[in-house]
Image: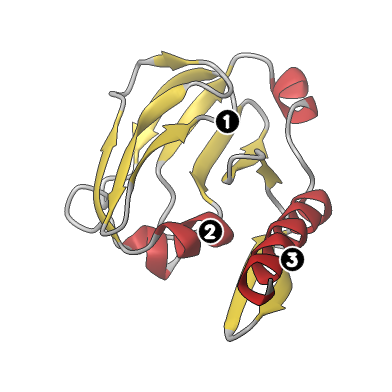
Amino acid sequence: MSGFIEITYDKFIFRVNKDCLYSKEGFWAHIEGRTATVGVADFKQKTMGDVAFLQTVDPGTVVRQGAPAGVIETIKTTSDILSPVSGRVTEINPNMQDSPHLINQDPHGAGWIYRIELADPKTDAQGLLEAEAYGEIMKEHLSREAGKKNG
């Protein structure tokens, strides 16, 4: 891994893995050849709250970039897992059923959600953001939130 970009806001530190690509919706994909590992970005998991339950599509399911591939329930909300890439799901993280809180504890490591065989790695990558660009989106969001607090 080439490391993380860290963005500090108030008492929170948000980390963006430089080895991943990101969707605007807050999901990451670590692409290696024709396979991608998918998870929830640190910023998204911190703003969603503690993950209590995770439901994913079954292995073998074909998903499209931006389409639902499961649901995450937290103490605050329920949200769709919007796949950052297209292809056939090949593996679900076996630890997610009993330990969905791994998404909060280690979102870019043990908290990965699924692996997918990519339909078209080059096209999917073009639809995603590099770590630096995703970091800028986070900063804009935090700035808007700060404006609401102070306004």
**Foreground residue, 83 or 73?**
73
Alpha carbon separation for disc pair 2 and 1: 16 Å
Q: Earlier in the sequence, mark 2 or mark 1?
A: 1
Q: Which mark is residue 35?
A: 1
List x then y, in percent, for residue 105.
Answer: 40, 69
Residue found at x 64% / y 66%: 148
List x then y, in percent, for residue 146.
Answer: 68, 71
- As shown in the figure, which amino acid type bears the numbered disc 2? His
* Residue at the limit of the structure toward the front, as seen here: 151
Q: Secondary structure at mark 3?
A: helix
Q: Which mark is residue 149?
A: none
State the quadrant of the N terminus: bottom right
* Residue at the limit of the structure toward the left, as seen here: 98
Height in image: 9 above or below 123? below
State the quadrant of the C terminus: bottom right
What colouring method underlies this structural image?
secondary structure
**10 Å crowding of disc 3: few (<14), some (14-19), many (20+):** few
Q: Earlier in the sequence, mark 3 or mark 2?
A: 2
Q: Secondary structure at mark 1?
A: strand
**Horizontal side of residue 134 vs 30, given as left or right:** right
**Residue indicated by mark 3:** 143
**Residue indicated by mark 2:** 108
Height in image: 86 above or below 138? above
Residue 14, image quadrant = bottom right
Residue contact between numbered discs 3 and 2, judged by CB atoms under 8 Å: no
- As shown in the figure, which amino acid type bears the numbered disc 3? Ser
- As shown in the figure, which amino acid type bears the numbered disc 1? Thr
**Horizontal side of residue 111 vs 10, given as left or right:** left
Give the number of the mark in front: 2 or 1: 2
**Horizontal side of residue 58 vs 9, given as left or right:** left
Residue found at x 34% / y 62%: 102
Residue found at x 56% / y 54%: 41
